[in-house]
Image (spheres, helix red, strand yellow):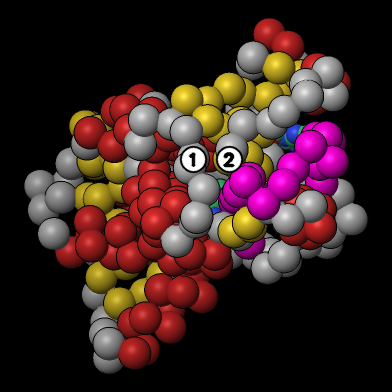
Amino acid sequence: MKQFGLIGKTLSHSFSKKYFTEKFVQLVLKDHVFNLFEIPIIEDFPALWQSKEGLVGMNVTIPYKEQIIPFLDALDDSAQKVGAVNVIKITNNKKLIGYNSDYYGFKTSLEYEISNFKNDIHTALILGTGGASKAVLVALKDLNIDFKIVSREKSKADYTYEELFKCTILPHLIVNCSPLGTFPNIEECPNIPYHLLSEKNMLFDLVYNPAETLFMKNGKSYGAKTQNGLDMLHLQAEKAWEIWNE
Ligand SMILES: NC(=O)c1ccc[n+]([C@@H]2O[C@H](COP(=O)([O-])OP(=O)(O)OC[C@H]3O[C@@H](n4cnc5c(N)ncnc54)[C@H](OP(=O)(O)O)[C@@H]3O)[C@@H](O)[C@H]2O)c1
C-alpha cells in the first residue's frame, strides 16, 4: 500500500483528500490511499508519521507550514526560499524532504493571467502576512513585480488597511492572502479603497470557495480583472503529485 495524507489542526473540509482520492480512482491505483491526520500540536508529528504504514507523501496545512520545518531532514529550493513547507516527500531511506508547491501554484496561475491581460503589471499589494503570503511574496520577487505588504498590524508590514485610504492610486495587482470572504463568511472582504480601482488593475484572491468572493465582486464593479485561487489550488496539488512520484 502507498499512503498519502494531510497534516493540520482542523481538517473537516479538506480539498486534498477528495482530489487525490478521485485521482487514485481515475488512475486505477487501488493500493493508494489519502488520509487526514489531525494533530493538536506539531510535537505529535514524529510519532504520527513513523506509525503510518507505507506513508510516502504528505501535504501540510494551517497552522503547521512553518512549524514543521525543524522536523524535516532537508528542504528543496522552493521551501528554502519561501520559509514554509506544504508538501513532504518521504524517501526510500525514510528521510523527510520539504517542498513549497503554493509558490509554484501561485506563480504559474499569475503568469497565465498576466499573459492574458492587456495592461502592464509592475507593482502589487499583498494583503495578509501568513504562510500563503510568504509564497506569494517570493513569486512576485521572481517575476520582478515590486510589492508592498498590508497587515492589520503596522509592525508586520508596509501599510495598515487604514493607511491605504490615504492613497490616491493603488498598485496594478492586489493579492488577497487573508482568509476573508471564505465560505460561510462570504459577506466579508478586505477593507481596501475599491473606488480607486479601474480596468488597469488585477485582483487575485487566494480564496477559492466561493468561486467569486466579495473582494472579486467589488473589484469587478470598478472594471478590474479578477482571478480566484482555484487554478492555483489545482496547480499546487498536481505539483505535489509530481514531487511524490519523482
Ligand atoms: N488557492 C490556493 O491554492 C491556496 C493556497 C494556500 C492558501 N490559500 C488560502 O489563502 C488564505 C491564507 O492562507 P494562509 O495559510 O496564509 O493563512 P494564515 O497563515 O492563517 O494567514 C492569513 C493571514 O491573513 C490575515 N488575516 C487573518 N484573519 C484576518 C482578518 N479577520 N482580517 C484581515 N486579515 C486577516 C493575517 O495577516 P495580518 O495578521 O498580517 O493581518 C494572517 O496572517 C486562506 O484562505 C487559504 O485557504 C489558498
Residue 66 in view here: no
- Label 2 with label 1: CB-CB less than 8 Å: yes
For ligand 1, which image quadrant applies? top right
The residue at the point 71 percent across, 23 percent down is 151
- Look at the image and give the residue range highlighted in magenta: 189-208
Q: Quadrant of residue 221?
A: bottom right
Foreground label between 2 and 1 = 1
At horizontal 18% and vertical 64% (from top left) the residue drawn is: 245
Q: Which residue is mark 2?
A: 173
Quadrant housing the N terminus: bottom left
Residue occupied by mark 1: 121
Residue 229 sits inside the magenta stretch: no
Query: Would you place residue 167 above or below residue 245 in this image?
Result: above
Image coords of residue 214 (percent x, y): 81, 56
Relative horizontal placement of residue 98, taking residue 21 as reference (left or right): left
Asked if residue 125 can be seen in this view, the reply is yes
Residue at the right extreme of this rendering: 187
Label 2 vs label 1: CA separation?
A: 6 Å
Q: Identify the mark nearer the N-term, 2 or 1.
A: 1
Q: Looking at the image, which is closer to me, 108 or 95?
A: 108
Q: Is residue 197 magenta?
A: yes
